[in-house]
Image: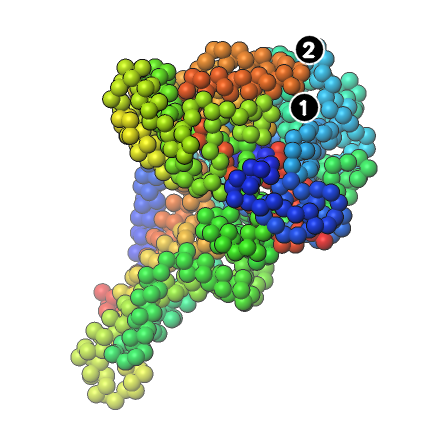
Amino acid sequence: MRAMGAAGVALALGLSACAGGTTPKTDTGSAGSTVKDAFNAGLTTVFNPSEKKGGIIKLADEAAPDTLDPGETYYGYSWDFVRVYGRALTMFKPAPGKASAELVPDLAETLGVASDGGKTWTYKLRKGVKFEDGTVVKAADVKYAVLRSTDKATFPNGPAYFEAMLNMPKGYKGPYKSKGMNTDSAITTPDDSTIVFHLIAPFAGFDYLAQLPQTIPVPEAKDTGAKYKEHVISSGPYMFKTYAADKSYTLVRNPYWDQATDPNRKALPDGYDVQLNVNAEDIDNRLISGDLDVAIAGTGLTAASQSKVLSDPTLKARTDNPTLARLWYTSINPTVKPLDNIDCRKAIEYAMDRTSYQTAYGGAFSGGEIATTILPPMIPGYQKYDLYPAGADNKGDLAKAKESLAKCGQPNGFATNIAYRNERPKEKATAEAFQQALARVGIKLTLKGYAKADYFSSYAGNPPFVKANNLGLALNGWGADWPDGFGFLSQIVDSRVIRETGGSSNTSVRIPEVDKLLDQAVNELDTAKRNAVWGQIDKRVMEEAVIFPGVYAKSLLMRGKNLTNVFVNESLGYYDYMALGKP
Amino acid sequence: MITYIIRRLIAAVGLLVVVSIITFSIFFVVPRIAGGTPETLATRYVGRAATAETVHLTAQKLGFYDPMTVQYANWAKGIVMGENYDYGAGVERCPAPCLGYSFITRQPVWPDLLDRAPVTASLAVGASILWLVAGVATGVLSALRRGTIFDRAAMGLALAGVSLPIFFTGLVSLAFFSYTLGWTAPGGQFVPLTENPAQWAYSMILPWITLAFLFSAQYARLTRAGMLETMHEDYIRTARAKGLRERNVVIQHGLRAALTPILTIFGLDVGLLLGGAVLTEKTFSLNGLGKYAVDGIVSQDMPKIMGVTLLAAFFIVIANLVVDLLYAVVDPRVRTQ
């Protein structure tokens, strides 16, 4: 499973305190900023604020990004870093705390203007924005960028929202294969600075789509298809100087970037050096010693480093512990008998020891917070509730579980299987935790490990296989593409995304009422009403007991020793790479 | 001798074909036998929210709808005749020997291999020289001073060398020599030999020593055992009786005879390392062939796996051939045969 999705929102202070953290002090500087190292100092405040320019920020990645092409990248941290060299129509506000949930215009002058009941969205581009070669960015460049991203034969990894929502001409296969085909039914550009998107159906959250890197302009004359990733033409403050696939890349200032056109970026460093495929433990050591500034993948310190860092107050003070917009959960498949009976499913909800789920994922500190809902707390529409209370100690309510078993006609329990990914020890530990906890009420689980690469396509996400092999439970996880109900829920609770041939993350939620609610929310232009529907969907799915929410994921990030303007962008789930300085 | 070499090279080609068929079968035929479809295979190479159409397009582009034999033949054809690749905005020619395009990065595999081979070669050659010199020298001295403190200390150290895994010694040495003392380069700092020889050596010295520590231990023990046996042979006594200097007796008569089994293992070890020193490369963040292979396996990127497997097999075959030829140099009896 790819580490993707613009996951994450940092935690409010109260929540971080739950995790054993301390409240950061605001020692000096402006309100909402701090200069003293403290645990979680970068969560809700800007750590070490500065306007000073200069320096090269050194980053390292334990692997390599999927691609640097804004039209295809689907890694969460790439959606953060891409803003250094590209400007999408909108973006999440570069600010710490809840403020980052706000969408602000980037390449566009304002947020989108909806018409036709949300079926048409119009954006006006800022004047004077230029590519790295000095060419002025036009609306046609944005249109071309979006259209090329829909060519899934060339860009199979990228998000597929635009081709699903735009009113594309029939048989359109992208600008390479369908060269010259009129695409005005999908996107029009009445003039050089206006772009209009025409949708098949209303979509109230289109501004979220407009922040996807796929709206970063691409000049058609410079496009090289799948090879464009080797030299992306910059529209942001930095441009590529070198690119060595799987090894490294460097960025230097784009001489044609103009601060006057960009209220969101300060462009403090002189450049970025990114090293790829660096050993994760080595990255931690270099981060600790100050030889490295940022672990770009943002997955947090390794388990080995965590114990070292957390036991040293000086090192711990350099870390932040955000909660992410990611849920580790377990699908309860109603297609597998006897789980077609809701009371049998409820028995599992009641009988599971939630603390053992949390322990399996690494504990309260770096594993995650115990979840009782599908939506993580930072997603708009989240409502705190617990339909299946597990007792004061969170170890499960066995009396209720037995009561449910009796109701479903299995008073002595039943047997089923639980699927997990072989390569993920945390999932195996969780499956074992389920096995032990459910055995207390007579539910016998047999562990079934499968290869990660084919987990969804051939096994846990393949409905005929699930049924034939009695996979009553399947370990699962999901990170939001963006912190919004649609971004989080659409792929995991919509029954229409389930493919009989396999490959879907949703394996257990088939509730027609939920599908209708999803459509209702998508069409709702009023934000408050829309968010209320997301909460309604969350609760409705939990009522059916087809998902056991495990933990809201957390990570332990370390701030580079010499950095300024460090904060976790809640909406992205990482340090805001665009805002960093290193004078 | 030339006929012998040609015969060995032809056999090597046959071996490479067999290796490629086995590798192909493991990664492609077996999943199909287990019930996989072209679509389930293609799902590995698309994004998480891919539509059924995207999966279909990908399966089509990667040739998964073709019969297995055709898929293998197409891949093999690319090695001999090259291959064309549609990158959307145009068609790219991958000249022979084109080992295919990565399913993940969609870049030709062959240039990647060429790019990474110097890293692995630098590691393997440097480390092998170190471990051969250190291992053999220690082994000889230990054998000559059997039972002394030196012998015991050296063999104790050798035991530690064999026992300690490279990811432990590597990380500890990085933390100490690179990050604490600052004497050696941090991980992932490879500089090509052609660019700056001094920097090349600086960037590789720690991986060399760490890897050599592991191997030299094994060679020291082997050499010691061989030397102990050889030094009790009759011809050694004869050499001494003839009045030869002890140094000549040890080196020309003792060591030379003890070297034959060491050469055999040395050839295999160097061949294996040239195909990728997975753990060392991973520990020191060196983007060599071993790391490339692991990346390929993790992402089920068949062309990558095929490419690096073939190259590794090629290196092992060549290394063995070189060793066989060196036998003749080391052991006069082979020449006469």
Foreground pick, A39 / A5: A39
Q: Which residue is mark 2?
A: A117
Foreground pick, A443 / B21: A443
Marks 1/2: CA distance? 15 Å
Q: Is residue A138 above or below residue B273?
A: above
Q: Chain of mark 1?
A: A
Foreground pick, B16 / B166: B166
The numbered mark, 1 or 2, whose residue comes first in the sequence reads 2
Q: Is residue B69 above or below residue A273?
A: above
| Residue kind at label 2, given as amino acid type | Gly
Q: Within 10 Å of the Cα at label 1, are there few (<14), some (14-19), or many (20+) other Cα atoms?
A: many
| Residue kind at label 1, given as amino acid type | Asp
Q: Is residue B48 above or below residue A364?
A: above
Q: Secondary structure under badge 1?
A: helix
Q: Position of residue B273 (x, y in %)?
A: 39, 55
Outermost residue on the left side: it is B234
Residue at 72% across, 38% down: A236
Q: Is residue A202 visible?
A: yes
Q: Which residue is mark 1?
A: A207
Horizontal side of residue A383 vs B125, given as left or right: right
Q: Secondary structure under badge 2?
A: helix
